[in-house]
Amino acid sequence: MRIRSLGVIDDAVVELSPGFTAVTGETGAGKTMVVTSLGLLLGGRADPALVRIGAKAAVVEGRVVMRPDAPAALRAEEAGAELDDGALLISRTVSAEGRSRAHVGGRSVPVGLLAELAEDLVAVHGQTDQQGLLRPARQRQALDRYAGDAVSVPLEKYAAAHRRLRAVSGELEEITTRARERAQEADLLRFGLDEIAAVEPVAGEDVELAAEAERLGHAESLASAAQSAHAALAGNVEDPEGVDAGALVAGAHRALESVRAHDPALGALAERIGELGILLGDVAGELAGYADDLDADPLRLAAVEERRAALTQLTRKYGDSGNTVRSVLEWAEQGSVRLLELDGDDERIDELTAERDGLRRELSALAQALTDARAEAATLFASAVTEELASLAMPHARVTIDVRQTEDPEGVEVGGRLVAYGPSGTDEVELLLAPHPGAQPRPIAKGASGGELSRVMLAVEVVFAGSDPVPTYLFDEVDAGVGGKAAIEVGRRLAKLAKSAQVVVVTHLPQVAAFADRQLLVEKTNDGSVTRSGVTVLEGEARIRELSRMLAGHEDSVSARAHAEELLAAAQASA
């Protein structure tokens, strides 16, 4: 993580260890700015007062390594971001005027997206900022993972039955609540189908009738034209001396036939004229037949027009934009199918009701199994966390998990009561803390003081190690009110948690810092006019000097140095 122009930090690079990183330094050196920087990358509130005096803006950039299929990576890709060699680049800029900008994977994004990504990236535990396991929904999810197959097996079956119950209930509600509308729809369909059945339309009939009506409506002119054309081609019986096309073509053919032997070219033409004569004869014959067959009956025309009117009425009511008989028949086919569905509602309601009741009984049994498994896991978990707290200077604290249900008259039956249910069961899970004997257990966010809360969450996270999917934990002031042996236990448990996740701790205690895989020093310098802080990775002699300072107040104390070396050796040995 790179920090520029934020508070007392001018420009610093914070290199976090994959395991346990401790951030140390004198009071006022700027350790809080490291936590604040991470908070900005996680979508925290942008305060323009944080911008370093004289700078236009504060900038925090982070590189987060993650699997391509991690929830945060998938959510970032949905927003258009891209991973860079398995890492997601995140930046946040806060101007001195108060404007804030965020970028993820090379894409400008709303600041709210950073907060969404933070849900799956970092769990923050501090006196003023608590996330992750303080939310009851996350507590239930973590408890389920802690319980393992005892919960996951019935939960998978329950979730499948719940999805099916929602689908069945939705369909049943849709059928029953819209019974009146569906009855009206069925009546309209029956009326339409009866009206179509009464007419008995045939596909393509409208086109054929239109052509027939056109022919019958102009029967006289068509007959006259056919007769005139026939006379022009084959002659008029009333005028035997008249000239017609057939006679002229026959005369031309005879003229050429008499000389075709003298020139093949004329012979070819004679053949073509002969073919023309045959064609004229055929056409003349068809014209004579057409005139004889033409029906000029006005009664037939009236019947055709009446049939067309009936079809037109159907196409206007049930046809598509083309108003064809075929579209009316298609409507009738679809309407028949839909009417069968509507007429089968009563039978369908009975089927759905029986299935719904069976699913509710199945959910009741699975919900009871889930509640029993969660209750058993909660007892084991609470005992383990209480034991952890005894070693973290909270010997009288007691943690319990409340697994409860909310009564709902429309819920499912669990333990003889009707309770509300959801996709994860009927249980509400909440972690409770009684900090001392005689105290009433309260939700951990309310039952612990600011200094105690981080230690409670540390104990919870240690017990849940490997169960919670969040890969990084940030503890600020986890050592408040702790010293001596208890401080060593805090450091040991942070190191234990770091075996399964990345842990970042801001601490004043050398007993805690000694257990870190990497120690960062936030150090303030002053050249007389400008005060700035930088971040340094401590190794070897430099780390011993810083641990000595944390122990004795100055790094040159011989006894403090010996104690620091002893702390470091003991921490490394216990790791």
Image: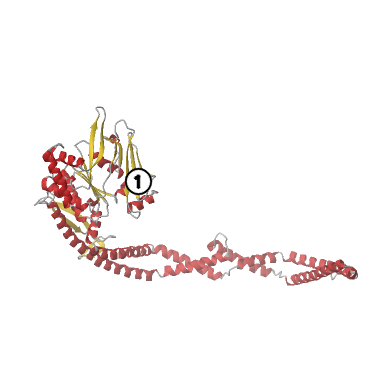
Quadrant for residue 557, please give it. top left
Q: Quadrant of residue 500?
A: bottom left
Q: In this rendering, would 5 be left or right of 318?
A: left
Q: Is residue 483 above or below residue 372?
A: above
Q: Nearer the viewer, residue 428 or 514?
A: 514
- Looking at the image, can residue 541 be seen? yes
Residue 135 in picture, x, y percent from top left: 24, 51
Q: Nearer the viewer, residue 385 or 166?
A: 385
Q: How is the image coloured?
A: secondary structure
- Tell me where residue 25 appears, x and y as whole percent: 20, 39
Front in this rendered view, residue 271 or 162: 271
Q: Identify the secondary structure beneath mark 1.
A: strand
Q: Give me the residue at 55% from left, 59% from top.
A: 321
Up-down relation of residue 552 to residue 167 (above or below): above
Task: Let me know if residue 449 appears in the view.
Answer: no
Residue 534 at x, y percent in the picture: 26, 37
**Within 10 angstroms of label 1, few (less than 14), some, or many (20 or more) residues?**
many
Q: Quadrant of the N terminus?
A: top left
Pointer 1: what residue? 89
- Amino acid type, callout 1: Leu
Horizontal side of 357 relative to 211 (left or right) equals left
Q: Residue furthest left?
A: 438
> Is 301 left, or right, of 462 in this rendering?
right
